[in-house]
Amino acid sequence: MKPIRYGMVGGGRGAFIGGIHRTAAAIAGNWRLAAGAFSSTAEKSRASGAEIGVDPARTYGSWQEMLSREAELPQDIRIEAVAIVTPNHMHAAPAIAAMEAGFDVIVDKPLADNLADARAIVDAAARTGRRIAVTHTYTGYPLVKQARRLIRSGEYGPVRRVMVKYTQDWLSRASDLENNKQAEWRVDPARSGEAGAFGDIGTHAANLVEFITGERIAAICAELTMLPGRRIDDDGAALFRLSGGGRGTLTASQVCVGDINDLAISVWCEEAGLHWRQEEPNTMRIGYRDKPTEIWHAGANRAYLASDILAIQRTPGGHPEGYLEAFANIYAAFGRTLRGMPQEGDEPGFATMDDALAGMRFVRASLDSSRQGAVWVDLASVE
């Protein structure tokens, strides 16, 4: 397919996630970076564009300038989509403006810094008819998709319990905030949004639960905490209830010493328990009561995987694929959608607006619960 020409908002010098998006788009092979407004000032944006290798004439001083000037270019030259990789508080304005200017959007999670802005983005997508995707990376892993297929098939029976954790240690010391651009905005409520760790990585954990089980988190009882001197949560845990009747626990922390980036999920059904860990993404364990435990492996030559899952793997078994490839699978799927190409499987390959809003309700409900002393909050009641 002809690559999608895209412009990037954010992701300049010192940014982490912008480089990940660009690499993922390149691996996907159906995207081409054509323009960008990479930083908060024109000078920094030009310097970043030069380092990245973007045409200086299409490296802009602001996202407003990029949208305006790109819209004036001939249709076969101007960008077709915008990738937004800014801190959370800067998602809504460029996303809405891009769609109103006729461009599709792919945005880093969470959708926005608060539920009201998230709803404004969803309304803009409905009003303009533009397509928009959110990059919940971990749903791009082949074995996560296979787990979804197995659990949702019903062969293991209904979901009884889920346990998911996402624990890190990169904010466990006061000194971790010094001269650290990534930490600086994530612990600032004005830029991170309503939640800290629960908004940053807790949304990934919640999304993974809903993606694999096919059920929404219906109610939550949460306790969010923070280290002394901080203004926003860096640690928390919650009980939750699923829409299908199952129960679960969720932990999200950036102060768990010794855990580098430990995202892990277990789903127990009537007849089997399924276990996957992001730091070992190419194996999945399925345990039974009356027969031996199974170990599933990822790889393009693992014929027992579903055909559409085999199709997104790039290497034979034993040659690990990981975070960048999972991210690339999301870009590849959204690119095919923009080109009107049919998708295989039972899901679009990227987080939809319904998924993104569910994540924002999870954040708000967690905060409401914690602020009221860890009471149960129904997500349907969240405004």
Image: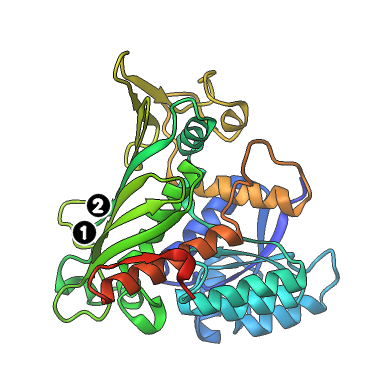
- For residue 382, above or below residue 153: below
Residue 326: image location, x then y, percent: 49, 44
Relative placement, left or right, of 188 versus 1 is: left
Q: Could you say which disc has been placed on residue 260 in the image?
A: 2
Residue 52: image location, x then y, percent: 54, 65
Identify the residue shown where x is 46% and y is 50%.
243
Residue 242: image location, x then y, percent: 41, 50
Relative placement, left or right, of 200 versus 121 is: left
Q: Is residue 269 visible?
A: yes
Residue 337: image location, x then y, percent: 72, 50
- For residue 152, above or below residue 129: above
Q: Foreground: 69 or 232?
A: 232
The quarter holding residue 239 reads bottom left
Relative placement, left or right, of 178 versus 364 is: left
The amino acid sitting under disc 2 is Ile
Element class at badge 1: loop
